Each structure stands twice: as structure tokens, then as C-alpha cells.
Amino acid sequence: MSTPDVPTRGPARPGPYVIAGILLIIAIAVPLFVPAYALDEPRLAGMPFFYWYQMMWIPVTAALVGASYWLVTKEDRRRREAVRTATGAGEKP
């Protein structure tokens, strides 16, 4: 016996996924462009720019990845809620 195909998510909006992708591209591509930060000056607490610039990208990348995750999960929740509302599964007796 087969079960009917019931969608678990509604239609996707491309906006959140595009924005999340752009944030992830920034987090990956900018640190890979080494000529932009292959410098000794300016120093921060005696540390060459090359090192502290890379260290600065650790929390920035974490924030960008976190924002991407938040956007995608928010869109997923919206899509699941759209199906629940359409099928009446979200209603309480």
C-alpha cells in the first residue's frame, strides 16, 4: 500500500537563500585574497597586520555563518508552517 505524496514544505522564496549564499561567499572568499593583507604594518599590540587580520576574521566568519543559518532556518520554518496551515495540521482541536 502506498501513501500519498504530502509535501512537508511550502514553496521556497529565493531571497533568504541568495543572501545566505552571499554571506558565505564573503566569509570564504575575502580571507583567501592574501595580497590584500600580506603586510607587516599596521601593527596591533606588536602583532603584524597579517596575523591580526586573520584573527579578526574568526569572529566575523562565525557571525556570517550564524546569520546564514538563521536566515535558512527561518525560511524553513516559514515553509513548514505554510504546509501546516494549508492542510489544517497546525490547528488545535
Image (cartoon, grey):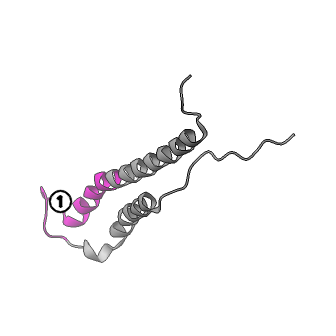
Residue 21 horizontal/vertical position (percent): 43, 63
Name the image quarter holding residue 45: bottom left
Quadrant assignment for the N terminus: top right
Extreme residue toward the right, this view = 1
Q: Examine the rendered structure and indicate whether residue 10 appears above or below residue 20.
A: above
Q: Is residue 43 magenta?
A: yes
Q: Is residue 17 magenta?
A: no
- Side of 21 relative to 7 (left or right): left
Please state the extent of the stretch shown in magenta in the rendering. Answer: 40-62
Q: Residue at x 54, y 43 (%)?
A: 80
Q: Nearer the viewer, residue 88 or 6?
A: 88
- Side of 55 relative to 83 (left or right): left
Extreme residue toward the top, this view = 93
Which structural element holds mark 1? Answer: loop
Name the image quarter holding residue 53: bottom left
The residue wearing badge 1 is 47
Q: Residue at x 38, y 69 (%)?
A: 29
Q: Nearer the viewer, residue 26 or 83?
A: 83
Quadrant assignment for the C terminus: top right
Magenta stretch secondary structure, dominant: helix
Q: Nearer the viewer, residue 22 or 84?
A: 84
Q: Residue at x 24, y 66 (%)?
A: 50
Q: Please tell me how crowded label 1 is: few (under 14), some (14-19), or many (20+) other residues with Cα within 10 Å.
A: few
